[in-house]
Amino acid sequence: MKISIIGGGLTGLVAADALSSEHEIHLFERLPYLGGCLSSYNMKDYWIERYYHHCFATDTALFSLLERLGLSGKLEWITGTTGYYARGRIFPLNTPGQILAYPELTLPDKAKLAWLTVKAKKIDLAGLDAIPAEQYIIENLGSNVYASFFEPLLKSKFGDRRSEVSAAWLISRIAIRSNRGVSGERLGYLNGGFHQVISALESSITAKGGRIQKQVPATSLEKQGNGWILNGMHFDAVISTIPPHELERMGGPALPHIPYQGAACMTLALDRQVTEGIYWLNMKESAPYGAVVSHTNFIPQERYGEHIVYLASYFSGTVPHQLDERMIADFCRRFAVPEREIHWHRMAVDPWAGPVYTVGYRNLLPAYEQDGLFMAGMFSKTNYPERSMEGSVRAGLEVAECIRRKIHGST
């Protein structure tokens, strides 16, 4: 079969690689590089992801992919430390002593939070899809735990839509982040960067005859008989990995609206670390970013020759005016960094970075096949109730298997 794939992110590449041994694959990517949210900057002496990344101990499909690509030996497990910026200072939240000393929560509050962390993996998420996260936390842990701990997290991630987010998303987030020791959380990273996954998939696809066209967006889609016309070319099947509403604009099926939001991620380099050794620093105070992710407080700075910091922000609609300038100005003021100390900075913006997991989101999940068109991506069931590299890999594999089953059933 002649199959087109719209989008060169992780899901699209995994699906292309899975099918390219048996079929003629044409992959279209509108950007000049592959990987989507897993793409990387190629600096002079190293690669660094455009958006911060790490993986978790439960990511079995990702680990199998790394094994097949010959990259599993580069996977390493490192302790990632966390903290909160509140009251004008940094509060580490890793050891029992640090958590007990955190002044924004009372001792009973901390006991309730610990109880929820232990319980999270056993909670039935399906029953939480219809319950707002705000309501769930206030009813079960109290209003102070919500206002002092969870609301800043939800605000930084979902902005004005935080009150719409379901408890299913929040509890799944807690459950996946509960692989903790007494000094922090065990997280996975690929020595040398995750760009190696994207590069290896690209090489594998092209070696099997697949065609990858960068800077070639999919602009038109039309059903024709048992196949499709995409960008004026006939295909027996089409896999779309872009947001469903974007596909609908070019002729795809009309589906229930899946809410999306954008991400704006500032990456900058310094000579020194400024978050007191903490990898993931959540902002309780208002700032033009919701978290400061100090990559080189997680991965050794010696691999880069400088300290790498991400400033993470999410938005709906268009990027806020002069967001990059406001991010840098706030970061320099808040962490006493003269702007001249910043070696370089880059701003990555994706207007459709991922879904907003609102109440009732589970009912919006589309099947892999819609009116003869195949769809997979961050909106797939494998990425519910939280998106991840694991979910994207599984979506790519599962949509490829759907095509195989359809071919087998029709012969």
Image (cartoon, rainbow, N blue to C red):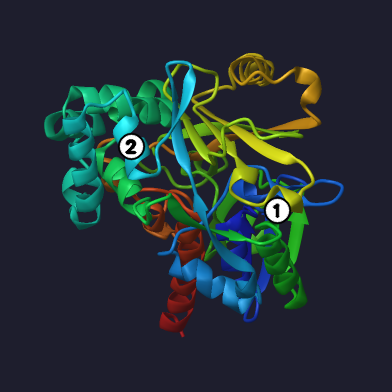
Indicate which label's residue lies in the foreground, 2 or 1.
2
Residue at 58%, 77% in the rendered image: 67
Q: Earlier in the sequence, mark 2 or mark 1?
A: 1
From the viewer's perspective, tell me whether residue 160 is left or right of residue 245. Answer: left
Callout 2 secondary element? helix
Residue 336, x across and y down, in percent: 65, 18
From the viewer's perspective, tell me whether residue 25 is left or right of residue 275. Answer: right
Indicate which disc residue 34 carries: 1
- Circle 2 is placed at which residue position? 99
Residue at 71%, 39% in the rendered image: 307
Above or below residue 48? Residue 270 is above
Above or below residue 386? Residue 86 is above
Residue 57, x across and y down, in percent: 43, 64
**Residue 18, can we see it?**
no
Quarter of the image where one finds residue 129: top left
What is the CA distance from the residue labelled 2 to the residue labelled 1?
Answer: 41 Å
- Residue type at tag 2: Ile
Q: Quick one: label 2, few (<14), some, or many (20+) residues within 10 Å? A: some
Which residue occupies the foreground of this view, 389 or 94?
94
